[in-house]
Amino acid sequence: MIKPEIRYELEVAYGSQYGLEEALAAIESLKNRAPSCGKKVKEFEEAFADFCGTEYALAATSATTGLSLAGIAAGVGPGDEVITTPISWIATAMAFSTLGADTVFCDVDPRTLNLDASVLEARITPRTKAIVPVHLYGQCCEMDAIREIADRHGVVVIEDCAHNPGGEYLGKKSGSLGDMGVFSFHQQKNMSTLGEGGMITTDDKELFDRALSYRSLCCRTYGGSSKYLPIDEEAHPMGKEYWKLYFDDMGYNFRMTDIQAAVGIEQLKKLDGHNATRIRLAERLTAGLSGIEGLTLPYVDPRGTHVFHVYVVQVEEEFPLSKQDFMWVLYTEKGIKAWSHYMPIHLTDPYRAQGHAEGECPVAEAAHGKYVTLPVHPRLTDEAIDYMTGCIRELAEA
Ligand SMILES: Cc1ncc(COP(=O)(O)O)c(C=O)c1O
């Protein structure tokens, strides 16, 4: 019989972990009237850039808006092509489709399910403006190979780091491996800023300045921050004419709030610890599940650090249950919220409407019939992991 507290954590399968530090930071922000994009956002951005080893970081309302902002900074627009993976949350592609760009899907590596660098170059055309590799499930793509191809063709690389803040490849942090990196602080991610939030990282001042401007309606006067609470006196460079507003172009409001940033600062301090717990729990899962016939366990590339946003197994034909039945029994009979990350983007209705179809990415399509996500968030105990492995072994042997 599953204990209620274990059942709760396995059913609420993914998610944020906050403590007293975040609560106190939020209260402090409330005392300061919880402003929009002010000093705390700037402090969070500086801490995040420092963490990733980049010159700049820019907070946004989500990774979706962050990806769009990165695309705008890189000049992505109608007539351009953006290459990405079919296995990601649909936001990765939509962020650029909504800018008017055409999405080109590059097939995936069958072991990691990350964008396959060995077939990337064949997808590049004279219209290619950006490549958006997604560090899927917490593991970095082969960024050295991707960078080399992108540089040779003069194409911008925008890393989608939604799954792996703190992840590394060849000793460098995600977010510092492309021209820009984009992170998500949605409630399900490895760190969160009160349910929603995002961050762009870059070393490129020009890209940063453009993203900063478009984040806040291209209002030159307030420099990408909130017009209600300027970051400091420098936001008033016009003296007595401080009230006059000037705009460089048409932009957006993708500003993070100070209370989110205050919580994000505390989450960032805990990120390495939370990632270490995820890695330890994933290793326990791997130890408990290894040797089961028909169940392929995650491949961990030794060149990087996989921070296990989720733990994904592949259910092969030799397994006694189909993917669907396996998920259904785990969910309804065992109280484990198995999921499937994700529907291949090119086969969703909006992308079919653009002419995408089966056969475009055969490796991804075959993998979709097999991949199942198991929870591995830091609130889980060893007992919960052992319960999961016990249930799966029972199903494998039935
Ligand atoms: C790989 C990936 N990219 C982008 C996003 C979009 O993030 P957000 O929800 O912060 O907009 C997500 C969210 O789940 C994601 O998983």
Image (tube, rainbow, N blue to C red):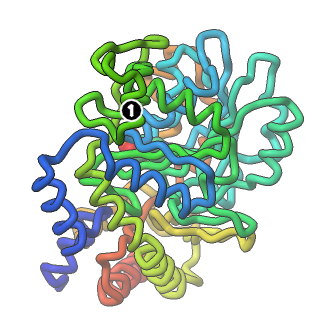
- Residue 118 pos. (x, y %): 83, 46
- Residue 263 pos. (x, y %): 28, 60
Residue drawn at x 85%, y 30% as measured from the top left:
153
Residue 147 visible? The answer is yes
Look at mark 1 in the image and give the residue it sits on. Answer: 235
- Residue 306 pos. (x, y %): 59, 69
Dot 1 beta carbon under 8 Å from ligand 1: no
The residue lying toward the viewer, choosing from 236 and 354, is 236
How crowded pointer 1 is (Cα within 10 Å; few <14, some 14-19, many 20+) is rated as some
Q: Is residue 77 above or below residue 289?
A: above
**Callout 1: SS:** helix
Does 112 sit left or right of 285 as displayed?
right
The quarter of the rendered structure image containing the C terminus is: bottom left
Q: Is residue 133 above or below residue 99?
A: below
Residue 363 visible? The answer is no
- Residue 132 pos. (x, y %): 63, 38
Instruction: Determine the residue located farthest toward the front in the rendered image.
Output: 240
Residue drawn at x 58%, y 27% as measured from the top left:
73
Does 260 sit left or right of 398 as displayed?
left
The residue lying toward the viewer, choosing from 358 and 3, is 3
Picture quadrant of residue 267: bottom left
Q: Is residue 50 above or below residue 41?
A: below
Of the residues shown, which amino acid type is indicated by label 1? Ala
Residue drawn at x 71%, y 52% as measured from the top left:
109
Quarter of image, ligand 1: top left
Residue drawn at x 44%, y 75% as measured from the top left:
278
Picture quadrant of residue 337: bottom left
